[in-house]
Image (cartoon, rainbow, N blue to C red):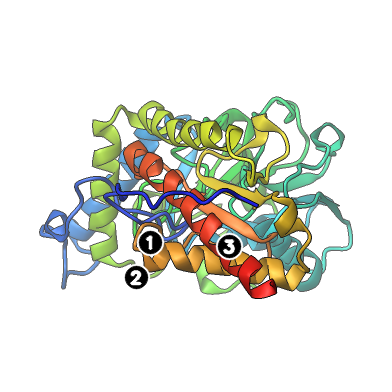
């Protein structure tokens, strides 16, 4: 039986470890939004200026190639990915990589909604990656850089050839600003404001390489495109989208918050500083896992462990012996106990993932809060196990 753990005395200053929307940046307050262009049109001079500021700061922080476009699009990362799928696919075969729930969502879109006949689906279970060496780059390739619900990321971009024939379409929603993205390997990249910089939801970001733009201008999809997916006019890319003239109305309050997050990112050393903060959070959890017998990373290979959506599985023989439903119930009790103590909110594993915990370690989470959380995990697990054992007796 797991030894009783003492009740910790130190609590995280912020108990917000949700994987989306994520913790606000340290020091954030509503006062940071006092200059928001509320009540003003997003097409007014001040509205366009603020939207352009988001694009320019994002471009500079991420060190985007000069010939890559960057735009703000509707419906968060989901909208950005689906805009790319509906607008770019269909002219050549496609391969979809899926090793967690959101990758499976894109499979559903392409196979069941777009019904592309030449779609190849390559999958791996939670905790694993597909064999990246076997990916067929004569096809368009759709994949996630980081699996938010599995805590598994691709280790680097070496598996993507520079002379690829197809486009690479990368969902990077929990990777952008926390992982080193090799832009020359990626033709389409998407993310949302609500992840690494702790922004608000509903707005997505879309980056297009020159190859992606050429595809847009040379291919007409065989299906109707909703207004919010349309990126061309008269057969040419609509450049206004990539200068802050958004397709639909954005929240100017959320825009102001995005600017605040980008300014904070600049103040902590840019993307390099953000990566350092995220990796330090992963390292703290890795040290704890190494000395804790009831838990392990869901990601099987250390080099594939996410530094943002850090997913943990319970490996205690007591837990493994439970039925699948009982495991889910025990993990739910664990997360609920932590929430009741106000030390960790929203850290239950994703609903379709194996029962366990998911701790956001992105840059807005302070390393001291991660350190303060870990003893509470031991305490809460011991409580749940003890209660279950007592009931069973």
Residue that numbered label 1 is attached to = 246
**Nearer to me, 172 or 79:** 172
Q: Residue at x 40, y 55 (%)?
A: 22
Q: Is residue 380 left or right of residue 88?
A: left
Please report whichever mark, 2 or 3, sits nearer to the chain's N-terminal start.
2
Work out whether 170 lies above or below 393: above
**Nearer to me, 194 or 48:** 194
Q: Nearer the viewer, mark 1 or mark 3?
A: 3
Residue that numbered label 2 is attached to = 249
**Nearer to me, 317 or 236:** 317
Q: Residue at x 69, y 66 (%)?
A: 327
Please report whichever mark, 1 or 3, sits nearer to the chain's N-terminal start.
1
Judge the density around disc 2: few (<14), some (14-19), many (≥20) Cα neighbours within 10 Å.
few
Q: Mark 2 and mark 1 in contact (Cβ < 8 Å)?
A: yes
Quadrant where the C terminus lies? bottom right
Judge the density around disc 1: few (<14), some (14-19), many (≥20) Cα neighbours within 10 Å.
some
Q: Secondary structure at mark 2?
A: loop
Q: Residue at x 31, y 50 (%)?
A: 11
Q: Secondary structure at mark 1?
A: loop
Q: Residue at x 40, y 54 (%)?
A: 193
Is there any visible trace of residue 220 in the rendered image? Answer: no
């Amino acid at each position: 039986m797991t030894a009783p753990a003492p009740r910790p005395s130190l609590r995280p200053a912020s108990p917000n470890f949700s994987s989306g929307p994520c913790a606000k940046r340290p020091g954030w307050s509503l006062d940071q939004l006092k200059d928001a262009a509320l009540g003003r049109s997003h097409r007014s001079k001040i509205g366009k200026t603020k939207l352009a500021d988001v694009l320019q700061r994002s471009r500079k922080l991420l060190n985007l190639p000069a010939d890559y476009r960057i735009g703000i699009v509707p419906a968060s990362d989901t909208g950005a990915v689906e805009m790319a799928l509906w607008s770019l696919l269909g002219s050549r075969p496609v391969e979809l990589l899926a090793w967690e729930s959101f990758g499976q969502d894109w499979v559903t879109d392409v196979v069941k909604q777009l019904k592309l006949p030449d779609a190849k689906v390559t999958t791996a279970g939670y905790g694993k990656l597909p064999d990246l060496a076997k990916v067929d780059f004569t096809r368009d390739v759709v994949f996630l850089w980081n699996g938010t619900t599995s805590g598994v990321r691709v280790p680097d971009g070496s598996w993507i050839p520079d002379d690829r024939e197809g486009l690479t379409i990368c969902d990077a929603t929990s990777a952008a600003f926390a992982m080193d993205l090799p832009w020359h390997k990626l033709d389409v990249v998407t993310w949302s404001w609500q992840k690494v910089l702790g922004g608000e939801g509903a707005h997505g970001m879309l980056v297009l390489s020159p190859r992606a733009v050429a595809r847009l201008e040379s291919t007409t999809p065989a299906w109707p495109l909703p207004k919010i997916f349309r990126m061309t006019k008269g057969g040419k890319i609509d450049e206004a989208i990539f200068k802050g003239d958004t397709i639909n109305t954005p929240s100017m309050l959320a825009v102001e918050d995005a600017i605040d997050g980008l300014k904070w990112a600049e103040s902590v050393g840019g993307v390099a500083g953000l990566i350092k903060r995220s990796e330090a959070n992963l390292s703290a959890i890795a040290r704890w896992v190494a000395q804790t017998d009831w838990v392990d990373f869901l990601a099987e290979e250390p080099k594939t462990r996410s530094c943002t959506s850090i997913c943990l599985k319970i490996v205690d023989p007591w837990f493994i012996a439970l039925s699948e439903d009982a495991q889910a119930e025990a993990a739910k009790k664990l997360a609920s106990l932590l929430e009741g103590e106000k030390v960790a909110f929203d850290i239950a594993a994703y609903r379709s993932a194996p029962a366990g915990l998911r701790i956001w370690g992105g840059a807005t989470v302070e390393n001291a809060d991660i350190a303060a959380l870990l003893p509470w995990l031991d305490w809460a697990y011991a409580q749940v196990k003890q209660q279950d054992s007592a009931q069973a007796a």
